[in-house]
Image (cartoon, helix red, strand yellow):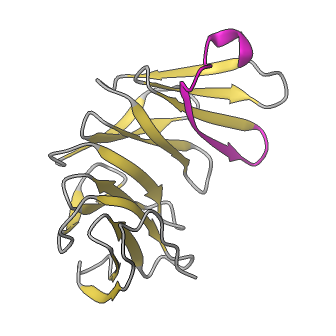
Amino acid sequence: STISGEGITNGELLILAVRAGSLVATASRDGTARLWSVESGECLRILSGHADAVVDVDFAPSGSTVLTASKDRSARLWTVETGDVAAKLEGHTAPVVRAAFAPSGAQVVTASQDHTARVWMIDGTCTQVLDKHLGAVVNACFSPDGSRIITASTDCSTRIWDPTFGDCLLTLKGHGGGIVVAKIS
């Protein structure tokens, strides 16, 4: 089947991620993610298992693993080749709204409406809970060298963290409204 032939229309398609121009990953309110061939438009894998909408997707730097974030309060790592779940990242108490790989591919960070971000090893072990925000954490990502994590929150702050020890290194305040995204160079 093709992307247009799979009924992913009318706002059902939330996120696209492209790996090396050969695969597209889509996340949907139907609780699934799908992997598609860029060349043929064919759906290659359906990643089923979340109990609620899948709201974010990311490819590992190697391209061999896909990470999904869901309103079901979890994130999952999936093997691209088979579509099997490689690890479940569970521990958040509210929807997980973002998930991203570290540049090394050895860790991931998740952002949740439970006011935390979490750092995980790819085996599903949570190594740090970043819990200084007073509002939902709506975005989290690693710096390009992997030495820092930046989070954005509805509490009108952005924080920079050490992913190894979980220390908040810097808090940036000044916006009059919630921060929706933050990136670090």
Residue at horizontal 32 percent and vertical 80 percent from the top: 161
- Quarter of the C terminus within the rendering: bottom right
Q: How far across and down, in percent of the image, does residue 182 sit?
A: 48, 71
Q: Nearer the viewer, residue 38 or 5?
A: 5
Q: Is residue 118 left or right of residue 103?
A: left
Q: Is residue 161 above or below residue 57?
A: below
The residue lying furthest to the bottom in this view is: 170
Q: Is residue 130 above or below residue 66?
A: below
- Quarter of the N terminus within the rendering: top right
Q: How far across and down, in percent of the image, does residue 15 sit?
A: 57, 40
Residue at horizontal 83 percent and vertical 21 percent from the top: 40
Q: How far across and down, in percent of the image, does residue 84 sit?
A: 44, 27
Residue 2 seen in the current view:
no
Instruction: Count all numbered tags in the image, as a single digit.
Output: 0
Q: Nearer the viewer, residue 63 or 100?
A: 100
Q: Which residues are magenta?
A: 1-22
Q: Is residue 97 left or right of residue 126?
A: right
